[in-house]
Image (tube, rainbow, N blue to C red):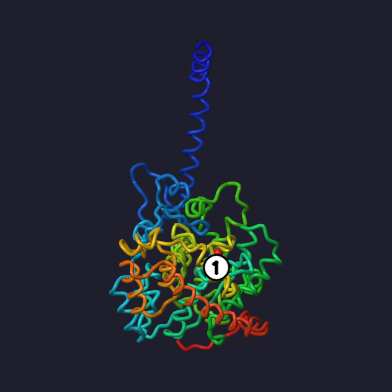
Amino acid sequence: MESCKYLSSNMIVLVPQAEIDAAVQLLLKLKVDYKQMTGQDYKAGCPPSENLIVSNNGPAADDCDGEDLVDPWNVSASSTKGVDYDKLIVRFGSSKIDKELLERIEKVSGQRAHHFLRRGIFFSHRDMHQILDAYEKHKSFYLYTGRGPSSEAMHVGHLIPFIFTKWLQDVFDIPLVIQMTDDEKYLWKDLTLEECHRFTVENAKDIIACGFDVNKTFIFSDLDYMGASPQFYRNVVKVQKHVTFNQVKGIFGFTDSDCIGKISFPAIQAAPSFSSSFPQIFGGKKDVPCLIPCAIDQDPYFRMTRDVAPRIGLLKPALLHSTFFPALQGAQTKMSASDPNSSIFLTDTPKQIKNKVNKHAFSGGKDTVEEHRKYGGNTEVDVSFLYLTFFLEDDEKLEKIKEDYTSGALLTGELKKILIETLQPMIAQHQERRKQVTDEMVQQFMTPRPLNFKF
Ligand code: TRP
């Protein structure tokens, strides 16, 4: 007791001064940060009006309240049904792709919407109406997407943005740039620069195998293009000047012990959103609008980009966001290339596909055949069914499978068989197309050059 008393009285005498000093220091620092972020002096009770990036997705905020965690490096949902995407729209401040937008896309493109759009796999957007408004007035746009080449092995989930981007390229007949962030993977993973660059080339083959038109597509490695394109690097530097350490801490959850390469990397992912980064394609035009199809975990990069754009006199990119491709084990997390049993790889043999689906695909069916027949299965959590929503294009077939599974007429083993028979030919065809991709073709896609399109 005595020592306790001694300690506490000691603290009362000694600690406050230090605490006050620390608090004053912190307050002064916060005022400086406030000014850096908003351009205004801090005034109590007067919140900043606009342009401040609010951290609504930092890991700290997400960890504590049982919400889904979604950032460029982690995805984990609190429910077995997966991430609550409606909530994510509210948290990220994006807009839902509603019926009206779907109809507009169909009207402007003159094509039936892709099943990824019809089925809500691409579910959220920013400024898509503006892209369509301009397109209707014969002002074209370009597409930008990317891939972080962290290994040679790509899985089916990695194809989602590319399959969709290819569809957009075809229906709107527009140029496309694909950023391979080998620099990002070097900074984040335990890999050498040579490995990352090699993965860029290997992954580029899988991307090319999706069928992109070489006359309308430029694929680039950051490690190569950053040094080769003065205009690209200028845009990187402009972005770097207009984003503070505090802002990226808030958006990406960086800490003081992250290397400075990571801290400045978001500027490199931002730069391809601006047409002036590609003078060989756009002839120095600064005002060609950009549309970015990507999985929603990439949105933090583009929230930052959109915040900076008007301050450096450039256009904000528009976005189309997709949901995640679930892991075989369930929709609580996305497929991960580092866990072979969570993914179907593009290199898997028909036998491997069959075994993985049968062994690992989380089932929404009941434990026994009797129970399943009586109560039916749950398509909302059944991974085989979820995969079919991605890859079975026939709406009627899919609807029938849903009915039959829900009623109990279709058993889990039968559902898995349908999935296996959908994936096997799809992946075999991909492997066949990839074999046709030569080193010269990769070289062609990756050479900075004019693209063939009219504006
Ligand atoms: N950071 C992304 C990844 O790790 C790669 C990427 C770069 C990207 N630019 C992009 C993805 C634009 C989508 C859109 O995979």
Q: Can the viewer see residue 281 in this picture?
A: yes
User: Which one is in front, 171 or 305?
Assistant: 171
Q: Residue lying farthest front? A: 370
Q: Residues within 10 Å of mark 1 (few under 14, many from 20)?
A: few
Q: Residue lying farthest top? A: 2
Q: Which residue in the protein does label 1 denote?
A: 355
Residue 374 in the figure: left or right of residue 354: left
Instruction: Give the residue displayed 50% in from the left and 71% down from the top.
Output: 273
Whole-percent x and y of residue 23?
48, 33
Q: Is residue 421 above or below residue 61?
A: below
User: Which one is in front, 17 or 301?
Assistant: 301
Q: Can the viewer see residue 308 in this picture?
A: no
Q: Is residue 98 above or below residue 190?
A: below
Whole-percent x and y of residue 279?
56, 79
Whole-percent x and y of residue 297?
47, 61
Whole-percent x and y of residue 73?
53, 57
Q: Is residue 169 above or below residue 189?
A: below
Quarter of the rendering occupied by the C terminus: bottom left
Instruction: Give the residue displayed 55% in from the left and 68% down from the top.
Output: 355
Q: Secondary structure at mark 1?
A: helix
Q: Hey, which quadrant is residue 315 in on the image? A: bottom left
Which amino acid type is shown beneath numbered disc 1?
Asn
Q: Is residue 338 above or below residue 213?
A: above
